[in-house]
Image (tube, grey):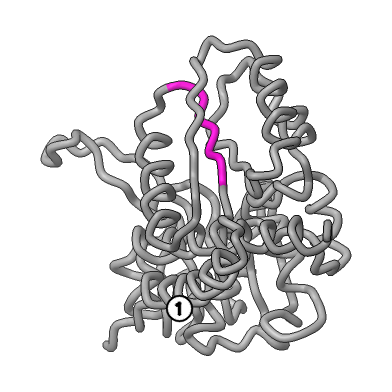
Amino acid sequence: MSQALLLEGRPAADAIHRKTAERVKRLRERGIVPKIVFIRVGEDPASIVYVRMKERKAEELGIGSDTVVLSDTAPQEELLSLLKVLGKDPMVHGILIQAPLPSDMDAIQIVRALPPEKDVDGFHPINMGKLLLGDPSGFRPCTPAGIIELLSFYQVDTCGADVVILGRGNIVGKPLAALLMQKGPKANATVTVVHSSSRDIPEHTRRADIVVCALGKPAFLRGDMIKPGAVVVDVGVSRVIDPTNPRGYRLIGDVDVESVSQVAGKLTPNPGGVGPMTIAMLLANTVDAAERLTFNAS
């Protein structure tokens, strides 16, 4: 039995990075340096790694970046005050608050405090509203937008396709559904969002042309839950204890790769599939913000 074609994220992300670098070059020729500020609260090990990855890629593309680290005991008002300062700074074009935040902080209130025009993660209510309305003047959330661009890069046609999204979260499930149901290229799909209260989940996934897993449940999707030739996008990541690993754990996606790869036509690896696309879209959004803030103000 043939193995599924792997939809590697790096080639698709590199294609976006090349376009982003060209746009940065044109801005720099006009004396404009796109800049993003990363805000990290606390010393979560994964957050430290993720921010460093974004910093390195920003530097490669010629995008300026700063990282502000607050103590995990910092009051919420300190973060809100920082957002006000960054919102007024004309040299800052994008702001990203790295998740997770401490449990005593109100994430919704903090996202609302972001200037929408600098919300390059795309989660401010104004940007989410524009997303639902199909208004291109907002910012698309990075992971859903990255999935759309990844499918397009590998010529996966979503027009008229039955797409089942496992998970209804605000970061992936809901915004991805909104993107896929839009009119136009890279969209026009028939979308079903499956969640914890859905009945007979395999009944939904077996009819899908494209299945997107964003549950955070290790190896949830099995080969007997999809139809032959389906496209499977593995988004969720879980940390599973593994005494044989030097780190004491290993990362596992939502897909049971061994069984799904024998049935699916195309499958994103995890890691290495959606992850690189998320960073690519974040930095593309940052350049979008720099262009809008510069040229719309002039």
Tell which of 291 and 14 is nearer to you. 291
48 and 147: which is toward the camera:
48
**Quadrant in the picture for residue 133:** bottom right
Q: Main secondary structure of the magenta part?
A: strand
Q: In the current view of this chain or complex, which residue is farthest to the right?
A: 133
* Rendering coords of residue 41 (x, y %): 51, 24
Local secondary structure at mark 1: helix
The residue that appears at 65% across and 22% down in the rendered structure is 79
Where residue 203 sits in the image (x, y, percent)? 62, 69
Q: Mark 1 points at which residue?
A: 15
Question: Is residue 178 or residue 139 the one in the foreground?
Answer: 139
For residue 9, above or below residue 173: below
Q: Quadrant of residue 285?
A: bottom right
Q: Is residue 41 magenta?
A: yes
- Reply yes or no: does residue 150 show up in magenta: no
Residue at 77%, 28% (x, y): give it.
109
How many numbered tags mark residues here? 1
Q: Which of 224 and 233 is in front in this view?
A: 233
Image height of 224 relative to 99, above or below: below
Image point 83% across, 60% down: which residue?
298
Among the 4 quarters of the image, the one containing residue 96: top right
Give the left or right position of residue 158, taking residue 29 as reference: right
Q: State which region is magenta.
A: 36-42
